[in-house]
Amino acid sequence: MAQRARLSADDWVTAALEVLVSDGISAVKILPLAKRLGVTRGSFYWHFENHEALLNRLLEVWEETNSGSIIRAATLEGSIVDRYVALMRCWLGFERFDPRLEVAVRNWGRSNPELWQKLRATDERRVDACVEMLAAEVSDPVMRLHRARTIYFLQMGWYELEVDEPMDARIEALTYYFDIYVGRSPTADERAAILAGLRL
């Protein structure tokens, strides 16, 4: 096999993420990845101690991109509309959040009890960020928690259910979801800001 210029660890991670998303965790194996990258299996060990180290790195990427994106968006400085737009842009796939990776990691977790527990803890942190987002709008803490859960469960379920809807229709719907999530209808200016922010 002709050896390519030496790959970086990121090259291996990128290839492994592509396979994870397209074929699931059972397909993320060293030899097939080496063939995919056009290198020998030994190239892998320049960058990773073992297969588990690669899998751990995949989870780190997921944590950084998907969880990090959601939490940063929901807790950024600004108005409820600023936060709402930032958060919805994550779930629309406009920011670093990768919906396909999210589904792939959750499918992985169904066969890995340790990862499943990590996913549960991650869900709690994300819901907590949504609770914080609503703090200035929803005074009752119990209602705030339930609204935060509604935001999170509905948007996460969108990809699990593989809902097929044109992007324009989904963006328009998010102006109505604001009422459900926040507990009041957006003003005309807020609605315009939501649409403008989501259509960037």
Image (cartoon, helix red, strand yellow):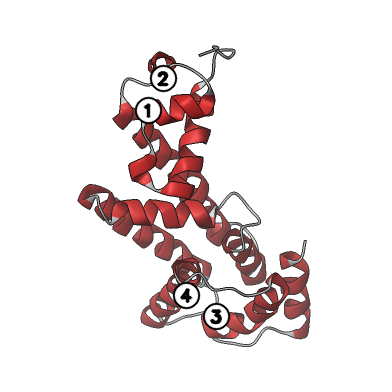
Disc number placed over residue 44 in the picture, else none: 2
Residues at discs 2 and 1 in contact (Cβ within 8 Å): yes
Most extreme residue toward the left is 113
Residue displayed at 54% across by 61% down? 74
Judging by the rendered image, the residue that carries numbered circle 3 is 182
Residue displayed at 30% across by 59% down? 120
Judging by the rendered image, the residue that carries numbered circle 1 is 30
Residue displayed at 50% across by 14% down? 1
Name which quarter of the figure residue 145 lies in. bottom left
Q: Nearer the viewer, mark 4 or mark 3?
A: 4
**Is 172 above or below relative to 102?**
below
User: Considering depth in this image, is 18 or 176 the residue closer to the camera?
Assistant: 18
**Is 31 above or below relative to 43?**
below
Q: Is mark 3 on a helix, strand or loop?
A: helix
Query: Which sits earlier in the primary sequence, circle 4 or circle 1?
Result: 1
Circle 3 Cα neighbour tier, 10 Å, few/some/many (<14 / 14–19 / ≥20):
many
The kind of residue on which mark 4 rests is Leu
Judging by the rendered image, the residue that carries numbered circle 4 is 154
Q: Is mark 2 on a helix, strand or loop?
A: helix
Residues at discs 2 and 4 in contact (Cβ within 8 Å): no
